[in-house]
């Protein structure tokens, strides 16, 4: 593995005089103990806010003879490394469920919600489901299976999931659900915990839904907020993409914020991915074109006093090109942001991919590293999934060979020193 590009490009704040820049170095990669061809291990990766637990999805894994039923592997921090703890699968897993297409966890990593958007529910193909698992000691058990009410064929409920820090609220996106007669307008189902169950609390839809807006494409949940993206909505200025903020301080969730890119353009897909930490949110627009290349990540900070999100200068690709995909995935954790660009060319290798690590706050972000894989090659697409923690960045390579198995998938791990 290779670490290059310390401290250049982007919206960079200078390093304090005398301070030694952080260095991100490769660690042993993660792989499934029972790796098999085409599992797509690493298609998604999440690190808990506590930094103690990581979840890696393999949505195309065969389970009990069911092709592409899917699984999620759990790893726990063990000193300076990570140890496999458990494999999570649905108790009613079936062929083509794609369990693990989305994953979200609580602050301490003891509860996780996992989406299976192509699951057949009550005879309705691709209606989708989401599963909640809880850890007691070192043992994981499935607690509940969530489905949307109403559930519909092709809704893809579970394409995106989000759970708040204390496991009290779960939001599940169904971006292909029809709303008010508009096909694929999208909706978000909100569930609130009641003892050991999660009854459906509210159905959120876009204020003015439209065909193919895909409301619910990306989600983030805090204690009283639900953040929802609608990346294909066309705005008044012709740009595409909106991110909505819903809040419920005393009752049902109400729309409080509507965020767009100040320099948005047609086809930007603002809201393609969303990640939030403390009072900072990063929103990607993977097709935004600028002199820096294709892709941008927009930064917003929130004031609890005014309930207002303030736009900060965007993070732009430091060495991008017209064929890049900067912001395909984003992850923020306590002042560290990881941004995947799986279409970035490395030397003569087209679409080898890279992941950029920034540190900072509010309007000041410094590029700390450009991470690449030394054993990657053209079309590896390194950076299709990323997870950030202040001292750790994980990058999924779903098509990488693992343990001698072709295309089983791995997760590259980088540590800050």
Image: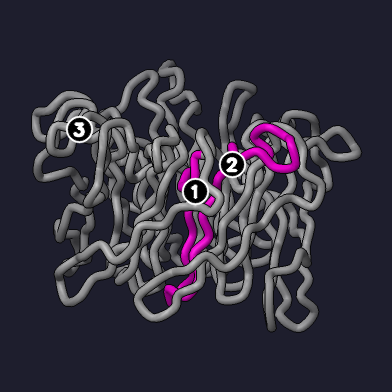
Tell me if residue 44 comes above or below residue 16 in the rendering. Answer: above
**Does the magenta portion include 79?**
no
Q: Tell me residue 43's x, y (percent).
A: 35, 39
Compared to residue 279, the image places residue 154 above or below, namely above
Q: Where residue 64 appears, x then y in whole percent?
A: 13, 38
Q: What is the quadrant of residue 99 in the picture?
A: top left
Can you see residue 288?
no
Q: Residue shown at 38%/59% (left/top)? A: 113
The kind of secondary structure the magenta stretch mainly shows is loop
68 left or right, relative to 253: left
Task: Say left or right for 175 vs 193.
Answer: right
Q: Residue furthest front?
A: 122
Say which residue appears at 22% left-offset and 29% top-offset: 67
Look at the image and give the residue range highlighted in magenta: 156-185
Q: Tell me residue 196's x, y (percent).
A: 35, 76
Q: List the residue tagged with mark 3.
A: 66
State how many labels appear: 3
Q: In the drawing, does residue 143 fall left or right of residue 231?
A: left
């Amino acid at each position: 593995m290779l670490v290059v590009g310390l401290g250049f490009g982007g919206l960079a704040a200078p390093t304090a005089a005398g301070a030694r820049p952080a260095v991100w170095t490769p660690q042993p990669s993660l792989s499934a103990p029972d790796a098999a061809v085409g599992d797509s291990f690493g298609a998604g990766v999440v690190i808990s806010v506590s930094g103690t637990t990581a979840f890696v999805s393999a949505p195309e894994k065969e389970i009990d003879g069911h092709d592409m039923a899917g699984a999620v592997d759990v790893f726990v921090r063990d000193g300076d490394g990570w140890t496999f703890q458990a494999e999570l699968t649905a108790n009613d897993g079936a062929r083509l469920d794609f369990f693990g297409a989305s994953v979200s966890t609580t602050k301490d990593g003891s509860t996780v919600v996992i989406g299976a958007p192509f699951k057949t529910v009550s005879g309705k193909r691709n209606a989708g489901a989401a599963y909640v698992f809880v850890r007691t000691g070192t043992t994981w058990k499935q607690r509940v299976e969530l489905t949307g009410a109403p559930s519909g064929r092709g809704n893809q409920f579970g394409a995106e999931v989000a759970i708040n820090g204390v496991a009290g609220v779960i939001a599940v996106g169904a971006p292909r659900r029809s709303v008010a007669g508009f096909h694929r307008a999208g909706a978000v189902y909100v569930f609130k915990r009641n003892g050991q169950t999660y009854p459906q609390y509210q159905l959120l839809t876009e204020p003015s839904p439209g065909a193919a807006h895909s409301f619910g494409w990306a989600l983030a949940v805090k204690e009283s907020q639900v953040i929802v993206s609608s990346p294909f909505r066309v705005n008044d200025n012709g740009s595409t993409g909106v991110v909505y903020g819903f809040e419920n301080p005393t009752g049902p969730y109400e729309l409080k914020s509507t965020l767009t890119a100040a320099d948005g353009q047609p086809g930007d897909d603002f809201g393609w991915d969303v990640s939030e930490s403390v009072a900072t949110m990063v929103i990607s627009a993977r097709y935004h074109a600028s002199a820096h290349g294709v892709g941008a990540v927009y930064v917003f900070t929130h004031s609890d006093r005014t309930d207002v999100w303030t736009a900060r200068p965007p993070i732009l690709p430091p060495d991008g090109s017209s064929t890049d995909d900067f912001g395909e995935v984003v992850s923020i954790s306590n002042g560290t942001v990881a941004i995947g660009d799986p279409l970035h060319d490395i030397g003569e290798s087209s679409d080898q991919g890279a992941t950029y690590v920034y540190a900072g706050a509010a309007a000041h972000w410094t590029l700390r590293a450009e991470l690449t894989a030394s054993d990657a090659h053209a079309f590896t697409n390194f950076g299709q999934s990323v997870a950030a923690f202040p001292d750790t960045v994980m990058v999924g390579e779903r098509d990488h060979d693992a343990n001698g198995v072709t295309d089983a998938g791995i997760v590259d791990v980088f540590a800050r020193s």
